[in-house]
Image (cartoon, rainbow, N blue to C red):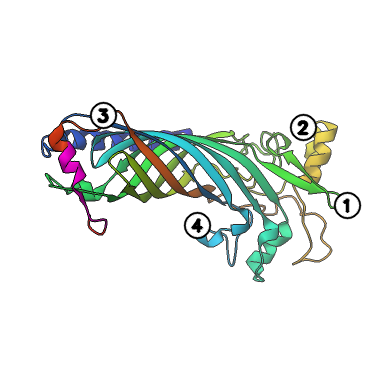
Amino acid sequence: MKKRLQTVFNHTCLILTLSLLFSIKSFSQNLIFQTGKVIWEAGINVGPSFFLGDLGGNAGKGTRFIKDVNLQFTNIMKGVFIAAYPTDWLGFRLAVQSGTLEADDAAVNTKGVDELWRKQRNLDFRTNISEIYIAAEIFPSMLFNAIAETNPRMRPYGVIGIGMFHFNPQGSLTDASGNKTWYYLHPLRTEGEGMAEYPNRKPYSLTQFNIPMGGGIKYFISDRFNVSSEFLYRKSFTDYIDDVSTNYIDPALFSKYLSASDAAIARQIHDKVYGIVTPGVTRYAPGTQRGNPKQDDAYFSFLLKFGVRLGNIYENDIQRKVLHQLRCPAKF
């Protein structure tokens, strides 16, 4: 696991380094816009976020993209960012964001065999999530806009970077009166994490690396103010954002590793099977599939970003006049 994270980190750093080297070269190719001045920009963003994991989903077998999104669990993610632009086609962004992710097997509303097995599993989760990441923004239309006489208002771009995020999943139990109570799942070891009987299931960390990637369109309202629409997907390296990954364990083991009160909750919350495919079943046998460890969890957002460029954004009067000759949005 650590080796894979290190490999991803090294590859991302290589991409960012090469981008920086190319941007330095571009200074000598575009004397009007690239005279060595770094333009700084700060802003805020807000938009809906969605979870892709083992729980919930739609028709067929579970996947890791839009097909399995349950819109009723849409949540808002918000954040702030600061970016530096050493050239008009390349920027480097530092962003901090927070929001909520959730999913529920009860949301499965189709009648196929795969869907009914997930619905019978009857698990749910929610978690607050916070993240910080650095990323490169690449504007391809500006990359090929060498020594242009005008500057476009509308600029498509791509984003890729590396980040860290923190989560802490909760699951629910509902009493006879219909009242739902939420419990933190990590300390309950619902899949035997850290138990000697399951040596390959190590306790998962609540802070993990991710790879943010995506793209968007940036529109300059003026030389100083801009608005962007952005899709941002986060590839994670854990299958435990929703606390579901492998197989059911022997519930008797909870009493061995947990306090009496926690063991009682863990026995109920790790297996809430509701007999749909197999009427009358009240508990799965140890070893029965609970999740799919072959696919890590992920999440994504559609963000509306508002940015303002800071300080003096012009090199001289000539550049000010050029930047005021903004090209029609229909052209790039």
Amino acid marked by disc 1 = Ser
Residue ID for mark 2: 257
Query: Which of marks 4 and 2 precedes in the sequence?
Result: 4
* Distance in Å between CA atoms under marks 2 and 3: 61 Å
Q: Magenta segment range?
A: 320-329
Residue ID for mark 4: 65
Mark 3 vs mark 4: in front: 3
Query: Residue 64 placed where, x, y %?
Result: 51, 55
Query: Residue 280 placed where, x, y %?
Result: 84, 63
Amino acid marked by disc 3 = Asn
Query: Which of marks 4 and 3 precedes in the sequence?
Result: 4
Who is closer to the viewer here, 293 or 91?
91
* Distance in Å between CA atoms under marks 1 and 3: 63 Å
Q: How crowded is mark 2: few (under 14 residues within 10 Å), some or many (20 or more)?
A: some
Q: Residues within 10 Å of mark 1 (few under 14, many from 20)?
A: few
Mark 1 vs mark 3: in front: 3
What SS does tag 1 mark? loop
Residue ID for mark 1: 177
Query: Which of marks 4 and 1 precedes in the sequence?
Result: 4
Residue ID for mark 3: 312
9 to the left or right of 319: right
Mark 1 vs mark 2: in front: 1
* Distance in Å between CA atoms under marks 3 and 4: 42 Å
Pick the quarter of the image with the C terminus.
Answer: bottom left
Q: Return the residue found at the far right.
A: 176
